[in-house]
Amino acid sequence: MAAYAVCVRDGQLLLSRSPAPDGGPPEWVLPGGGMEHGEDPHDTVLRELAEETGYRAEVTALLGVHSSRRAFPRRLGRALDRHGVRLVYEARITGGELCYEVGGSTDMAAWHDLDAVPGLNRVGLVDIGLRLWRERPPSGRAAEGREPA
């Protein structure tokens, strides 16, 4: 379980940057991450947002839920079957100052013009979060796929 924030202000989206695990180029991600044991997802998204960006925020809406399942090869011929459930919230910045996470899963945070997002090297959840934010589907489920260029 994880919780992520879509923060849009003055036509810009707040994103965190995550180094690629395979040594490739870094990827932009929605601020957020995994829940700690016993933690409420609402608290998770606010904690992660503060850790990754330096901002305090308030949750203004639950936009939706995204579920993903992937199999990863492992040694000895057995695959790892990973199922992730991600809650996507809308959040409004209420205080703090933009700063970078030290010693965490991200190394930078920045505001990006909404029109520039399709040109960024980003994870798919960024597009899912933007679709949920724009469309606000009653089901809380966004259509899959990348944002149009």
Image (spheres, rainbow, N blue to C red):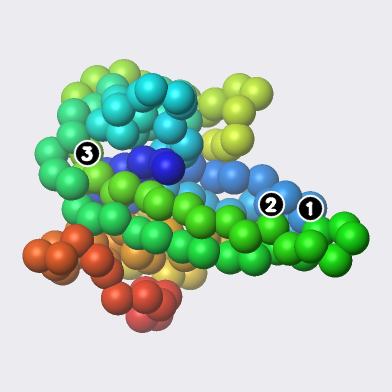
Q: Which mark is residue 91?
A: 3
Amino acid type of the residue tagged 3 in the rendering: Ala
Q: Which sits earlier in the primary sequence, circle 2 or circle 3?
A: 2
**Residue 149 higher or lower than 132, as above or below:** below
Amino acid type of the residue tagged 1 in the rendering: Gly
Can the viewer see residue 56? Answer: yes
Instruction: Name the foreground residue: 110 vs 92.
Output: 92
Q: Which residue is mark 2?
A: 20
Marks 2 and 3 close (CB-CB < 8 Å): no
Amino acid type of the residue tagged 2 in the rendering: Ala
Residue at x 59% of width, y 45% of height: 18
**In the displayed structure, does residue 130 sit left or right of residue 34?**
left
Disc 1 residue crowd, few under 14, some 14–19, many 20+, Cα 10 Å = few
Can the viewer see residue 111? Answer: no
**Quadrant the C terminus occupies:** bottom left
Residue at x 64% of width, y 66% of height: 71
Q: Which residue is mark 1?
A: 23
Q: Position of residue 107 (x, y in %)?
A: 60, 35
Q: Position of residue 53 (x, y in %)?
A: 43, 30
- Asked which secondary structure carries label 3, the reply is strand
Q: CA distance from mark 1 to mark 3?
A: 31 Å
Marks 1 and 2 close (CB-CB < 8 Å): yes
Q: Quadrant of residue 50?
A: top left
Residue at x 36% of width, y 24% of height: 39
Residue at x 18% of width, y 34% of height: 59
Q: Quadrant of residue 76?
A: bottom right
Q: CA distance from mark 1 to mark 2?
A: 5 Å
